[in-house]
Amino acid sequence: MMKTAMRVILLAVTFITLGSFSASRAQDKGQDMQLTTPSIETAILAGGCFWCVESDFDKLDGVIETTSGYSGGTIPNPTYQNYNKPVEGFEPHVEVLEVKYDATKISYEGILDYYFRHIDPTDDGGQFCDRGASYRPVIYVQNDQERDIAVAKSKEVAALIKQDVKVDILEATQFWAAEGYHQNYYKENPVRYNLYRWNCGRDQKIEKIWKKAS
C-alpha cells in the first residue's frame, strides 16, 4: 500500500511539473510572437522626384512597402499630368512617397534621419534638377508627436551641416498613389533612371552637403 501511494504521489507531481513547464513554454512562445509581430506605421515624405526617394527608402532596413504618389494639395484624383498644375479653387500637390515601416525595427526618428541624409535640406525651391514647389522637401506629420520629432530632427540637421534647413513640416493630408508606371520605376527602367539620377546630380550634391557635417 505504501509503495502504491508513493507511486500515485510521484505521478501527480510529475504531471503538475510537466503542466507547469508546458504552460511556461506556451507563455514564452506567446511573448516571442508578440515581440516579433510587426508594428506597421506610415510616413509621408517629399524629397524631390519620387522615383529617387522610393529607390532610397527601398534600401532601408525596416521599411515594408513604399508607394510613389501625390499629396499636400486639394486637386481631387490627381494624375501626373495635372497634380502640380494651377486649377482654380484648388491647391496643387507635391510629389511624395508613402513609407510603410515596421516600428519594431526602426523608429520614426530613424526614418527622418535617413530622409534628411538623402535629400538637399537646404533647398526649398525644388530638389536638384527638379525645380518648383511640387518638388520641394516636406515632412507631412500625422500628429503632435511626429511634429515634435520632425522639428527636433530639423534643428539637429541644421547644427550638423551648419546651414539653415528649409524643409517644410506640414499637417498630413490625403495621399494619392501615382500611376502604376511610376511605381518601382528605378527597377523597371534602370538605364533611364540611373542616367536621370546621375545627370540630376542628386548623389553628388548630397555627398557634398554631408561631407562637411560635424
Image (tube, grey):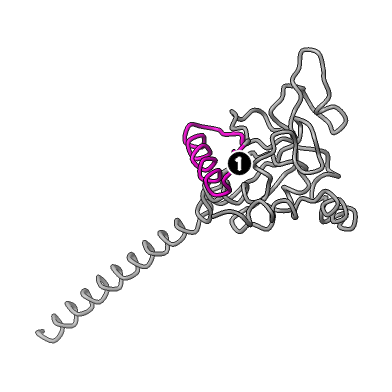
Q: Residue farthest to the top? A: 89
Q: Decide if residue 193 is on the left or right side of residue 15.
A: right
Q: How many marks?
A: 1
Q: Quadrant of the C terminus?
A: bottom right
Q: Quadrant of residue 128?
A: top right
Q: Residues within 10 Å of mark 1 (few under 14, many from 20)?
A: some
Q: Nearer the viewer, residue 144 or 205?
A: 205
Residue 33 drawn at (x, y percent): 47, 59
Image position of 78 with respect to 205: above or below? above
Image position of 190 with respect to 124: above or below? below
Name the residue rendered at 51%, 40% in the picture.
155
- The stretch in magenta equals 139-165
Residue 7 drawn at (x, y percent): 18, 82
Majority secondary structure of the magenta segment? helix
- The answer to if 147 sits in the magenta stretch is yes
Q: Which of 67 and 93 is in front in this view?
A: 93
* Residue, disc 1: 43
Q: Quadrant of the N terminus?
A: bottom left
Q: Residue farthest to the left? A: 2
Q: Which amino acid does label 1 sit on?
A: Ala
Q: Residue farthest to the right? A: 192
- The answer to if 25 sits in the magenta stretch is no
Residue 15 drawn at (x, y percent): 27, 73
Image position of 174 with respect to 211: above or below? above
Image position of 25 with respect to 55: above or below? below
Name the residue rendered at 74%, 20% in the picture.
91
Q: Decide if residue 143 is on the left or right side of residue 94.
A: left
Q: In which quarter of the image is residue 97?
A: top right
Q: Nearer the viewer, residue 150 or 107?
A: 150
Q: Residue farthest to the bottom? A: 3
Residue 13 drawn at (x, y percent): 21, 75
